[in-house]
Image: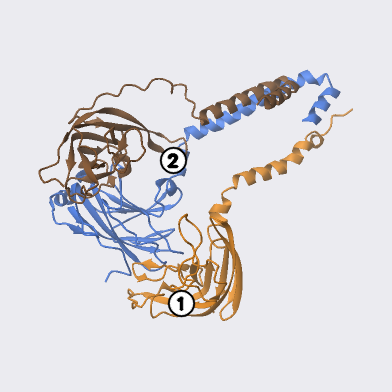
Chain colours: A orange, B brown, C blue
Amino acid sequence: MSAPGWWRRNRWGLVALPVAAAAALAASSYRVEDYWWLEKPRDLADGSRGEWVEFSASQYDRTGDVPFTVRVRLDEVRTASAPFGSEDPLELPDGVQAVAVDLTLAAAPDVPLAGCSLVLRDADGTEYEYQSSSPSISQATSPCVPPDARGPELDLFEGLDPDTGPRRPDEWAVSPVVLLPEGVEVTQVLLSWGPPDGLLISAG
Amino acid sequence: MSDSGGRLRRVALSASRQHLALAGSALGAVGLAVLVAGGFDPLADAAAPEVPPLTAGETVDLGPVTITPERLRVVDELPGISEGDDETRVLALVATVTATGTTTEYGSMLSGSVALDGVPGVPAGGGAEDGPVPAGDVYVMADGTRLDAVQPGLEYEVALVWEQDSRADVPESARLVLVGRTLRESSIDHTMEWLDPAPIVAGDLEVTAPSAEDS
Amino acid sequence: MGGARRVVRAEPPSRFGRLPRRAAFAVLLVAALATGRAVQELLPVSEDASAPFERTGGVGDEIALRWGEVEVTSVEGSTRIADPYGAVHVTSGVYVVVGWTYTAAGEPQIPSYVAIRDTEGRVFRTSVERNPYSSGGAAQPGIPRRVTAAIEVPVDAVAGAELLVTMEQNPENHRRDDIAVVDLGLTSDDAEAWAAAEEPLPVEDPADGTAP
């Protein structure tokens, strides 16, 4: 009786090998989500200028998940004349341009939407962020809601009333301003209320 | 516990001798890990060693810095320092500090290395803390600004300050505890850090009364 | 495992031949692991592998890095500085005040780690009040940001000092990332002159754009 072949002797080991390899990879990838997937908006809904896009995602706070649906329309990307939510004139250093992003949004007034980020991209993929304060500009904290009627906030701290201020209208327009080097052409507008979800609107 | 012990025994009995040795060492390792993680330290039961006495004007090596405590006084006014108001007065230790390491040490390390023990009304506001109270802040005597970083190789004359509830009496003397640290590899991220704070010297210092114009 | 034992039972004579082989295998395995560990301990791999990539230059050089560009534009010194809030700080050593321009690449970024390194390897970092430096927040890519850092150092640290600039505040996170190392071109004459200077040097707030 000949001895069983190598493959036969080790058949259980061979069966276990891919499982073990997969388990090892899974066990060592526990930070992929934090360091990559949640680092930036990657799960993107698409839209283009002048059309309404419906965007549904979720934020979370002390009460748990706070799902929301918002309709967004990018109207225009134009040269800005004033910071968003401020009467002060723009004072720009040499070589810097200010771009206003005209957006119309619509959502239920009881949905917290103030915590959003706005990023402009050029054709190379370079990203320029909405900043409420920098050495060259000072404007409203949130680029997505009317500065004087922000609507409810996320319930993040104990003792903080999340529902203050006037009621947000059902539909509103905002014009946040982003500073770019002169000569840069904006091709995409990226709105996000927290990664991994985002809304990517082409500006062309 | 007895149930899992029984299961372990059954497992152990059914295993071959090789496996028994393996299981034994694994069990030992797990047991040791549990003890270590739980903070078990066979040396911990040894009585805390007597801390040597402190002398004003004598330099003490705390590890990251050396410090020479000069005098303890009640401060009405020191530029920039929260002056004593109606509810609190400020106790200040005037000391000379030199950083001995090779990189910047931030201020919280210094203020955390000097503590007052058993002074009534410290901390002000009646925190429920027992034991020595670390200094609230550190100021540079030369310009009255806050010292939030100690640079290696530089000498600073500083005031380490505590707020005392003004309803408590100004103590005639106060027990000062200086806390030293050891440079060793952190078991968490394997970087060299100043760890294991422990009292190095402790003793009473006379408290100089407030100057003439009292608040 | 169950399969292996069945094989053993079917061929009892081979059982005793197999045990030494297993023992030898175990010894070999332990030896291999021990060798690996010994090699790892002997080679200075961990230090070299965790070192940042130093991009060097002098005052006035545009140093290109993964995350942008750094150019030191001015170096001054005195025993006093006036911080942006008007407070005057007095040092027993020397305040080195460095102005530089930073241009982000790719996306808005903040150079959070700023330090002076002397020839002995001592590192003097910025803080908030005593060693003022403010980045002004993330700088938009392509827009130069002018910033100033004032760091107090002992007089003997001035000659040959270098400025270090990188993104991550925690030095543990500098591994395998670019760090700008700028030779400030300082001599012991500078050190002596600055140690005697009493004029407070202003520390400017950050500003955008190239210098006017």
Residue situated furthest left in the rendering: B212
Q: Is residue B105 visible?
A: no
For the image, the number of numbered tags is 2
Question: Which secondary structure lies at badge 2?
Answer: helix
Chain to which the residue tagged by mark 1 belongs = A
Instruction: State the mark number for residue A175.
Output: 1
Q: Position of residue B167 (x, y in %)?
A: 24, 41
Residue type (three-letter) at the residue carrying disc 1: Ser
Q: Is residue C95 visible?
A: yes
Is residue C13 toward the left or the right of residue B143 in the image? right
Q: Residues within 10 Å of mark 2 (few under 14, many from 20)?
A: few
Is residue B51 toward the left or the right of residue B2 in the image? left
**Relative vertical location of residue C97 with respect to residue A73 in this rendering, above or below:** above
Q: In what quadrant of the picture does the N terminus of chain C appear? A: top right
Q: CA distance from mark 2 to mark 1?
A: 50 Å
Quadrant of residue B110 in the image? Answer: top left
Mark 2 and mark 1 on one chain: no
Q: Position of residue A58 (x, y in %)?
A: 59, 62
Quadrant of residue C206 in the image? Answer: bottom left
Chain to which the residue tagged by mark 2 belongs = C
Which residue position is annotated with label 2?
Answer: C47
Q: Nearer the viewer, residue B38 or A123?
A: B38
Q: Residue at x 18, y 45 (%)?
A: B141
Residue type (three-letter) at the residue carrying disc 2: Glu
Q: Residues within 10 Å of mark 1 (few under 14, many from 20)?
A: many
Q: In what quadrant of the picture does the C terminus of chain C appear? A: bottom left
Is residue A120 toward the left or the right of residue A139 in the image? right
Camera-side mark, 2 or 1: 1
Q: Residue at x 69, y 21 (%)?
A: B20
**Relative vertical location of residue B7 with respect to residue A175 in this rendering, above or below:** above
Q: Are marks 2 and 1 in contact (CB under 8 Å)?
A: no
